[in-house]
Amino acid sequence: MSFFNFPLAPPSASNIAQQYDFVFYALVALSVFFTLVVCAGAIFFAVRYKAGTKADRSRPMYENLPLEMTWTIIPLILGLIMFYFGTALFVKIKTPPKDCEEIYVIGKQWMWHMQHANGVRENNTLHVPLGRPIKLTMISQDVLHAFYIPAFRVQMGVVPGRYTQLWFTATQTGEYHIFCNMYCGTQHSEMGGKVVVMDPKDYAAWLANGGQSTTPMSMEQTGAKIYAKMHCDNCHGAEDTLHAPSLYGIYRKRRVFADGTSLIADDEYLRDSIVKPYDHITAGYGQTMPVYQSQVSEEDLLNLVAYIKVIGSPSANPPTSNVNRHSAPTAVSSTNEATSLAANAVQANTADPDATPTRRVGAPAVGAIAAEGRNR
């Protein structure tokens, strides 16, 4: 929508954008209409009955049932209609389809880190296919953020220590802005990025290529490496032991705790059991597990949870993705040696966790990982 080539609103590029716009503009129109009616009535009566006018005041009206019913029932009906459309939109936004493709997002000062299920990673850029439902599972590594895509009319808070989700289906190819819509520090205004909506065939080719010089590992494979590195398998084996319960087949199963309560082992429970294991101690065990809070990054936690979800099943050791390492785009390093590296991709398992998104002078764009130190 534009006025004399001045855009009044971002493009409508998702499945909920038009429904969202209808509710928004209907509320604006009703608000403007009733504001004008009330203001016009107030001005009319103020002028007509001001001191000194010859208006007839001999028969003042104290009640008028038809008028009162009119200005009560009509706004009530309009309010209920808008409530229905607003509620329907809210339920739609909060209920992702079961066939969504899941992408993981980590917000940190001041960048967005995206990770696809097959291991492909991006910074401040999110590639998605046209016409396919996408669910973003998000968490913050530091402070409160808000993931906002104006063209899709979606926004969700990104919170430390808690997974939040939003979903959308892109309906137009192109590039669309991503913003952080929650003040998160001195460089908040620079925490942006873009969504690249691609034709499904182009997206499949891009995803298969991986955008990395080495064959990427899936989240489950990366989680398996971390699991072994942290020696989790020393205690958590295929069967329950005196030291710890087995994690095989734990996902979506009910866990009974020492205090008599129970929970379904979902993503949130698995994450909390790593960083805060004493919040829910499994029945029959004591406080024997180390606390990993502040010792494991959110990215590693995502990978660990992904592995634990499938541990003990055939998919616990999935094959590596079929990335063509020879056809990947090349970039020239500081030593003039060609290396296979696609734009916006982060080397698998070599991302610098302390990478800063900004260098003010002669630097990469805001949010880019500064990789010069690894090339020297």
Image (cartoon, rainbow, N blue to C red):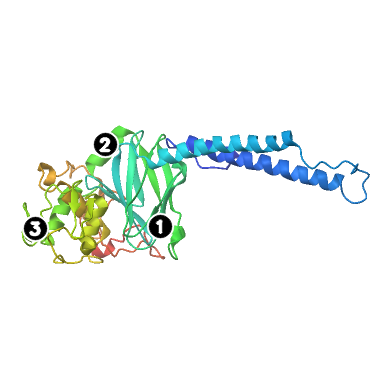
Indicate the amino acid at tag 3: Asp
Q: Which residue is mark 2?
A: 204
Q: Residues within 10 Å of mark 3 (few under 14, many from 20)?
A: some
Left or right: residue 110 compared with residue 290: right
The answer for how far apart the CA atoms under marks 3 and 2 are is 35 Å
Cα–Cα span, label 2 and label 1: 30 Å
Foreground label between 2 and 1: 1
Figure check: 102 above or below 260: above
Label 3: element kind: helix
Q: Residues within 10 Å of mark 2 (few under 14, many from 20)?
A: some
Depth order, front residue of 252/24: 252
Q: Is residue 93 rendered to the left or right of residue 340?
A: right
**Residue at 24 percent of width and 45 percent of height:** 117
The residue labelled by disc 3 is 233
Residue displayed at 30% across by 38% down: 100
What amino acid is at disc 2? Ala
Query: Taking 51 as reference, is 91 left or right?
Result: left
Is residue 176 shown to the viewer in this render? yes
Q: Quadrant of residue 335?
A: bottom left
Which mark, by number, is residue 145?
1
x, y percentage for residue 19? 49, 35
| Residue 61 percent coordinates (x, y) | 82, 41
- For the image shown, how many numbered marks are present on the structure? 3
Q: Is residue 187 above or below residue 44?
A: below
Secondary-structure class at tag 2: helix
Find residue 286 and report its horizontal and vertical position in percent. Answer: 14, 65
- Disc 1 residue crowd, few under 14, some 14–19, many 20+, Cα 10 Å: many
The answer to whether residue 336 is visible is no
In depth, the one of 44 and 298 nearer the eye is: 44
Separation (CA) of disc 1 from disc 3: 35 Å
